[in-house]
Image (cartoon, rainbow, N blue to C red):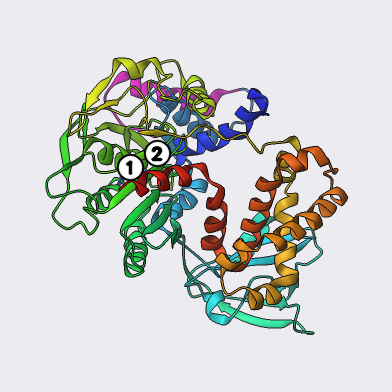
Amino acid sequence: MSMNKNSRLIVFMPILMAIATIFGVFIGKNLSTSGGGTGGSKNIFYSNGNQNEKINQILSLIDEEYVDTVNTDKLTDEAIAALLEQLDPHSAYIPPVDLQGVNEDMEGNFDGIGVEFNIVNDTIVVVAAISGGPSEALGIRSGDRIVKIDGQLVAGTKIKNEEVIKKLRGKKGTKVKVDIARRTVKELIPYTITRDKIPIYSLDASYMINEQTGYIKLNRFAEKTYEEYMDAFKKLKGLGMEKMILDLRGNPGGYLSVAIAIADEFLKNKEMIVYTEGRARKREDYKATSEGEFEDGALVILIDEGSASASEIIAGSMQDNDRAAIIGRRSFGKGLVQEQFEFKDGSAIRLTVARYYTASNRSIQRPYTEGTEKYYEEAYSEILNTDPNHQSNPGDTLHKYKTKSGRTVYGGGGISPDVYVPVDTSGYSKYYSDVISKGVSYDFCFNYADKNRNTLLKKYKDYREFGRDINLADKILVEFVDYADKNGVARKDAQIRKSRLWLINRLQSLIARNLWKNEGFYYIINKDDQYIHSALKYLNRK
């Protein structure tokens, strides 16, 4: 059974828009204007060209003569955004209010107290204290309830997420007082937390799937990603890793330099990784050095329609050099390079300045001449692609290239995998969709882990033991169905039977996340993952 096409588009379009606007391959650069931004004279660009002057004159004219009062700063922002939209889907304007958050994502840190939280029953509940943050150092733990912030009651006040963030974040070195309720303690526990730099991790999980095979999942290519990857690699290498699965599914990209550094770990000296070239940018080649630490081990790269930009650089370079098997579905197809130009008013533009090309000279960028909406619709259509050769895009049969060993690979948009994994709908039901979309499964698992935390941690030494207990899993499912029935998702026995394995897998993995963080979640969720099964099947032949 499958979802209606339009409803699936509604679900996926925000994700795809985020991929294009926020991430990509870009290089930071400052650009100053002599006029100091958009205030005062209203001049945003200075040029002797009449067409550029016309923009300034129109804005000044509107400010001075228009019938109603107009916010010219907002109008200028919207005009710049509209101008960039005419270029390509990835050139973008970032207003001052958004730039800090965008930069934090890529710089890999922000200032705050370091907790992941959720608002449950009108109460701020700590999901996890972030590793390396000040809250973890003080002993704040999962399940703690934040009742007061700086003496002000925040429980039962209908507080929103953005208000919590505003109260808890602040400059490094400043202090915030929180009063916490903990199940095992009768009175509130007061903490004074000194805010600090909080790391944003781009490595979701790393663990050994079996005695020889390691698994590493990256969610972006940010400033600290290479260091995170190397730490994970060394840990797994010490545990006996000889084969690796690098999971880049849903990874929308990031810094070019970081993607090159990770690709270099797998390729031999002087093998081509990628090159960039643009109208105003000379060709620049990026090749591997002799420093890689996993140049010979069996390797699989997992990709899907959410893998873009820097993810495609790695996948494309591995494929063109015959270094790894690419498994999954066709990647997003973003082969444009952005540079970030920042203005004095705190805004910035990310302007496309070049294209990138893989070692076989193919550009991975999908065509965008029919407009931005069509561009994203095409990426979405790949999600439903069931062609076993994954060559439904006509461009694939026209744009053929050769790898280092002479194998044929395809251009025309994205990286086409060596082993295609179709969309799995075997366990899908409306019931399964509803318990996810309405947040019922998430809330149940959080509450279950919160109530049974000490018992579960005492009974199971790790997430592996927990994931193997199928008797407990069935009991959890029964309890969950009753919970869902009381919280807006009516019991539907036939659909529950069809989705049973999917439901059990989801419930176990979400509970494991609350107890053992992301490593527990991915270990369990991957047990029934078709990508992982395909990867292991390939690696077992090596």
Q: Nearer the viewer, residue 24 or 482?
A: 482
Tell me the element at label 1: strand
Q: Is residue 487 magenta?
A: no
**Quadrant assignment, res 42:** top left
Does residue 55 belong to the magenta stretch? Answer: yes
Observer-nearest residue: 64 or 228? 228
User: Is residue 340 something one can see in this rendering?
Assistant: no
| Drawn side of residue 85 relative to residue 190, left or right | left
Farthest front residue in view: 541
In the image, which disc is placed on residue 485? Answer: none
Residue picked out by circle 1: 26
Q: Is residue 22 visible?
A: yes
- Left or right: where 251 falls relative to 514: left
Q: Residue at x 49, y 52 (%)?
A: 101
Q: What label sits on residue 327 in the rendered view?
A: 2
User: Is tag 1's residue or tag 2's residue first in the polypeptide sequence?
Assistant: 1
Whether 108 is drawn above or below 340: the answer is below
Task: Residue 425 in the image: state x and y as whole percent.
Answer: 62, 34
Q: Which segment is the magenta one? A: 44-66
Residue 527, x across and y down, in percent = 54, 52
For mark 2, give the secondary structure.
Answer: strand
Percent coordinates x, y for residue 361 in the rendering = 20, 28
Q: Is residue 63 above or below residue 183?
A: above
Residue drawn 71% across the image and 46% down it: 500
Residue 152: quadrant of the picture: bottom right
Discs 1/2, front: 2
